[in-house]
């Protein structure tokens, strides 16, 4: 930028696109990186870290994602209720069998900034366990 001035995109300049990704057979972590980049808008020329300029992402077949190595047996998800002794460890083998969309949300949320902007960006991610989704109208012909 000339004269040391920063550029911040205006709300009307942000052109949000819809990305449809089939998660069948894809590795959870590598797919989460790709989705987090799309949600933040880092690949756009108008990217600014303080402005929400990311795209919409629709993921299908989330239940058919895979984990590499021994992560399915060794990795755990931690949650805390806020009460003393309220910590819970859930193995990823159980989490991926019962709630694979929660495992994916945890992975993507960990890759987004830790602020209010991340909550806004997470609302633009739509996850579906099967091949069917409710966003047929957004598919460009």
Image: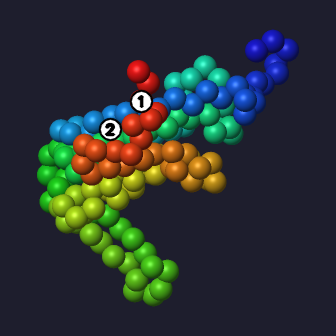
Left or right, 20 with respect to 73, comes to right
Q: Residues within 10 Å of mark 2 (few under 14, many from 20)?
A: some
Q: CB of mark 2 within 8 Å of CB of mark 1?
A: no
Residue appearing at x 73%, y 29% in the figure: 12
Q: Look at 45% across and 45% down and name the residue there.
A: 125
Find disc 2 in the rendering and name its residue.
31
- Return the x and y of residue 45 as percentages of the image width and height: 61, 19
Image mark for residue 13: none
Mark 1: give few (<14), some (14-19) or many (20+) Cα within 10 Å.
few
Name the residue at the bottom extreme: 84
What is the residue that sits farthest to the right in this orientation? 3
In percent of width and height, residue 2 lies at 81, 12
In this rendering, does residue 30 appear at all?
no
Q: Nearer the viewer, residue 8 or 1?
A: 8
Estimate the spatial distance between the alpha carbons at disc 2 and disc 1, rounded to whole Å. 20 Å
Q: Which residue is mark 1?
A: 139
- Quadrant in which residue 133 is drawn: top left
Q: Is residue 81 visible?
A: yes
At x 45%, y 79%, the residue is 81
Would you say 130 lies left or right of 42 here?
left
Q: Name the residue: 63% across, 54% down.
A: 116
Give the structural element (helix, strand or loop) at label 1.
Answer: loop
Helix, strand or loop status at disc 2: helix
- Rendering coords of residue 73 (x, y %): 15, 60
Residue 95 vertical position relative to residue 141 in the rendered view, above or below: below
- Farthest residue toward the top? 2
Quadrant assignment, res 141: top left
Viewer-proximal residue among 75 and 31? 31
């Amino acid at each position: 930028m000339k004269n040391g001035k920063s550029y911040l995109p205006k709300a009307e300049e942000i052109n949000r696109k819809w990305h449809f990704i089939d998660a069948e057979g894809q590795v959870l972590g590598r797919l989460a990186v790709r989705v987090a980049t799309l949600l933040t808008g880092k690949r756009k020329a108008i990217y600014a870290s303080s402005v929400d300029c990311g795209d919409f992402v629709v993921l299908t077949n989330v239940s058919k994602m895979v984990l590499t190595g021994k992560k399915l047996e060794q990795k755990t998800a931690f949650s805390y209720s806020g009460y003393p002794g309220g910590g819970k460890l859930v193995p990823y083998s159980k989490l991926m069998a019962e709630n694979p969309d929660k495992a994916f949300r945890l992975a993507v949320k960990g890759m987004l900034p830790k602020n209010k902007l991340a909550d806004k960006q997470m609302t633009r991610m739509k996850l579906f366990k099967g091949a069917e989704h409710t966003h047929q109208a957004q598919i460009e012909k």
